[in-house]
Image (tube, coloured by chain):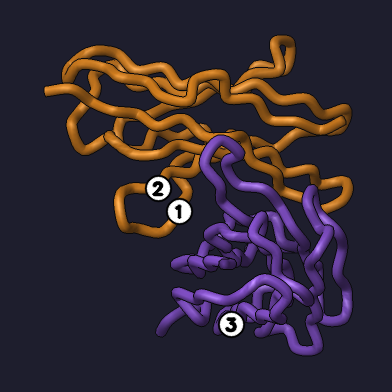
Chain colours: A purple, B orange
Amino acid sequence: DAGITQSPRYKITETGRQVTLMCHQTWSHSYMFWYRQDLGHGLRLIYYSAAADITDKGEVPDGYVVSRSKTENFPLTLESATRSQTSVYFCATRGGVSGTGELFFGEGSRLTVL
Amino acid sequence: AQRVTQPEKLLSVFKGAPVELKCNYSYSGSPELFWYVQYSRQRLQLLLRHISRESIKGFTADLNKGETSFHLKKPFAQEEDSAMYYCALAMNRDDKIIFGKGTRLHILP
């Protein structure tokens, strides 16, 4: 029972390449989130989704694309990676009645853009 | 604009001493506040949320709407409290949850 899993856990890529980070949950939580974690900036919200086919921009959406065709998956794509996107990316779900519960986080995906 | 402010990047406290990690927020709606903790090599996990008003691992936090604060407190620090602590604001009007920059708590022996 993994709950929420992210893949890959580690990725090294080059500037300009497309990268997709995967996030999968087994709880059927409606809400899913993507954050990036950087020293000095803490956790910043990239995109979030209230349900399948519903996505919204967070604090730092530029350079990222998301989709949510199924409730359990919420992939994050960097269409043309830049060095400033080197970061640790966390996916999270929010359960509870009408999505009012706590956030559950994945283990993170560490991305390095050379 | 909505904002969560954690003024201390690093807080060093001796074992057995009281701990207070500060969190202030800015939000015009009805706020829901959380504290999350990240221990070394572990996932971020919930420590406290203001609506539950409980004490976890000896930590408490009270929402002060007048001062727009949600400070985390513990009367006697333990070495296992060393971790990164994040304050978070759920803006239920538009389903966003945003975090502060975090405070690293270092408990000195």
Type of amino acid at the residue the image marks with label 1: Leu
Name the one closer to the observer, A69 or A85. Answer: A85
B44 with respect to A61 (left or right): left
Determine the chain carrying the residue at label 1.
B
In the rendered image, residue B85, in percent from the top left (x then y), is placed at 45, 36
Whether residue A3 sits left or right of residue A82 in the image: it is left
Regarding mark 2 in the picture, which secondary structure is present there? strand
Residue occupying image coordinates x 77% and y 63%:
A48
Q: Are discs 3 and 1 located on one and the same chain?
A: no
Chain under label 2? B
B22 to the left or right of A96: left
Q: Earlier in the sequence, mark 2 or mark 1?
A: 2
Q: CA distance from mark 2 to mark 3?
A: 21 Å
Q: What residue sits 18% from the left and 22% below the top? A: B108
Q: Which residue is mark 1?
A: B44
What whole-number distance in Å separates the C-alpha atoms at marks 3 and 1?
Answer: 17 Å
Q: Is residue B69 above or below residue A110?
A: above
Q: Is residue B37 above or below residue A47?
A: above
Q: Nearer the viewer, residue A48 or B65?
A: A48
Res B28 label: none
Check disc 3: other Cα within 10 Å, few if <14, some if 14-19, many if 20+: many
Give the residue type at disc 2: Gln
On the rendered image, what quadrant is the C terminus of chain B found in?
top left
Are the residues tagged 2 and 3 within 8 Å (C-beta)?
no
Q: Circle 3 is placed at which residue position?
A: A24
Question: Chain under label 3?
Answer: A
Q: For mark 1, does the 10 Å Cα neighbourhood hold few (<14), some (14 to 19), or many (20 or more) residues? A: many
Q: Which residue is mark 2?
A: B38
Q: Are marks 2 and 1 in contact (CB under 8 Å)?
A: yes
